[in-house]
Image (cartoon, grey):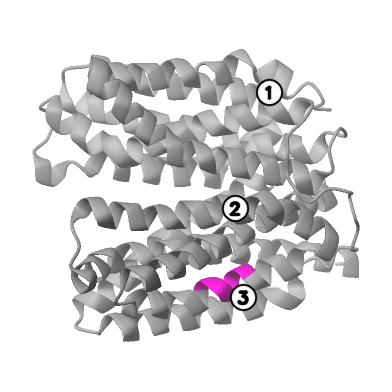
């Protein structure tokens, strides 16, 4: 094997580690949430406002992360973001005042936002160097990292380890993974693309809107699917999370097979088929009165949506209107805004016309993905 091929394999492995770190890091926080709420002794409403700090921090840094990656290279931004996640986890496990937790969550979200943008830019560069689809597989590692992070943190806490000790153990793993990836990440040439903000233009506008729609749908399932299932009488309250579990498993499986799929049928067909399958999943979930069949809708949604965002990011790497780093930064930022703002919007719609009607609206928005599949991939060779 040539040195070039060996280097490409090393770069791909490092990129997978970056995605694994991001998924692992954010998932480690979820089991710590009840402990943080108990330490502060605040009500749900006030604590919910504190949790918004993660999203605010992420969006703020995502806005600039594309420009920073272009100017200083993705390696530095990925490493800084990963180390930031590790440093903030112990503070999240011990913060005892609302102000301290808010500041920690802002910086934690900022670290997540920076590594999220930079790793996707790095993934586009690694994919371009290899000449074959890799983006779906990279994103599968984010999901796997999420399972591993939440699982390990939960196991440590359930085993009697204190919150701080559990957070330190998980932080040590993050640091180890970052330092393994560090020398293997692509050392891009520093370049000044003339912009600091990731504002979409040209074809990137459509790619960003479609990404926001898919992230909105994912946010809807995360925040509202349990209530939907219980309101429709499919499951009891304690089993409401089964829908999102099915969705997450199906999405991970779809991404693990996604690179082979897009190699075989192309990006346009992947968007078309994935979008239609996602819409079908919503129809099954909302229209079928039989619980088993209705739950299968989550599997269809997960499989259908699994490769849409990776394809959109790949197209951002191919377009020539914007610098790639800024284009991917714009898509990631608007997509994340969709996953944050979408569930709140669904709440307002549900209050007016009911939760099932709000989910039908989400399905209608997702239908724009297959409608725009050809236009979104018209540069595909």
Q: Where 273 sits versus 326, above or below?
A: above
User: How would you rate the neighbour count of disc 1 (Cα within 10 Å): few for under 14, some for 14-19, many for 20 or more?
Assistant: many
Name the dominant secondary structure of the magenta segment: helix
User: How far apart are the alpha carbons under marks 2 and 3?
Assistant: 23 Å
Q: Give me the disc on residue 178.
A: 3
User: How would you rate the neighbour count of disc 2 (Cα within 10 Å): few for under 14, some for 14-19, many for 20 or more?
Assistant: some
Q: Looking at this view, is 35 or 104 the one in front?
A: 104
Residue drawn where x is 66% and y is 35% of the image: 311
Callout in the foreground (2, 3):
2
**Would you say residue 133 is visible in this rendering?**
no
**Residue 341: x %, y % from top left:** 44, 37
Is residue 82 covered in magenta? yes
Residue drawn where x is 20% and y is 75% of the image: 158
User: How far apart are the alpha carbons under marks 3 and 1?
Assistant: 34 Å
Q: Looking at this view, is 261 or 228 the one in front?
A: 228
**Residue 351: x %, y % from top left:** 23, 23
Give left or right: position of 123 versus 100.
right
**Residue 112: x %, y % from top left:** 55, 61
Callout in the foreground (2, 1):
2
Q: Where 199 sits versus 38, above or below?
A: above
Callout in the foreground (3, 1):
3
Q: Which residue is mark 2?
A: 60
Q: Give me the disc on residue 268.
A: 1
Please identify the quadrant where the C terminus is shown.
Answer: top right
Please identify the quadrant where the N terminus is shown.
Answer: bottom right
Secondary structure of the residue carrying tag 3 is helix
Residue drawn where x is 47% and y is 75% of the image: 88
Disc nearer the start of the sequence (3/1): 3
């Amino acid at each position: 094997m040539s040195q070039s091929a060996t280097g490409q394999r090393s770069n791909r492995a490092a990129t997978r580690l970056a995605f694994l770190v991001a998924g692992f890091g954010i998932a480690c926080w979820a089991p710590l949430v009840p402990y943080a709420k108990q330490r502060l002794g605040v009500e749900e409403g006030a604590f919910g406002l504190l949790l918004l700090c993660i999203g605010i921090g992420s969006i703020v840094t995502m806005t600039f992360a594309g420009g920073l990656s272009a100017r200083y290279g993705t390696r530095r931004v990925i490493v800084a973001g990963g180390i930031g996640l590790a440093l903030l986890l112990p503070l999240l496990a011990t913060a005892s005042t609302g102000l301290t937790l808010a500041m920690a969550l802002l910086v934690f979200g900022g670290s997540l936002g920076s590594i999220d943008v930079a790793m996707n830019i790095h993934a586009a560069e690694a994919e371009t160097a290899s000449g074959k689809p890799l983006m779906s597989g990279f994103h599968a590692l984010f999901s796997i990292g999420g399972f591993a992070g939440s699982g390990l943190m939960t196991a440590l806490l359930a085993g009697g380890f204190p919150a701080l000790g559990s957070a330190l153990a998980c932080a040590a793993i993050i640091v180890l993974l970052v330092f393994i990836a560090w020398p293997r990440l692509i050392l891009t040439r520093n370049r000044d693309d003339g912009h600091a903000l990731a504002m979409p233009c040209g074809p990137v506008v459509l790619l960003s809107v479609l990404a926001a729609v898919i992230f909105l749908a994912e946010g809807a399932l995360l925040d509202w699917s349990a209530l939907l299932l219980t309101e429709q009488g499919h499951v009891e309250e304690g089993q409401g999370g089964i829908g999102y579990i099915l969705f997450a498993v199906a999405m991970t499986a779809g991404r693990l097979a996604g690179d082979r799929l897009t190699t075989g049928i192309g990006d346009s067909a992947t968007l078309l088929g994935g979008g239609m399958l996602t819409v079908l999943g919503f129809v099954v979930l909302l229209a079928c009165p039989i619980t088993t069949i209705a739950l299968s809708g989550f599997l269809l949604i997960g499989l259908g949506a699994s490769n849409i965002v990776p394809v959109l990011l790949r197209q951002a790497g191919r377009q020539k209107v914007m610098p790639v780093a800024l284009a991917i930064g714009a898509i990631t930022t608007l997509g994340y805004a969709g996953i944050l703002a979408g569930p709140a919007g669904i709440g307002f719609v549900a209050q007016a016309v009911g939760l099932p009607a709000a989910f039908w609206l989400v399905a209608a928005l997702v239908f724009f993905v297959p409608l725009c599949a050809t236009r979104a991939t018209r540069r595909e060779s």
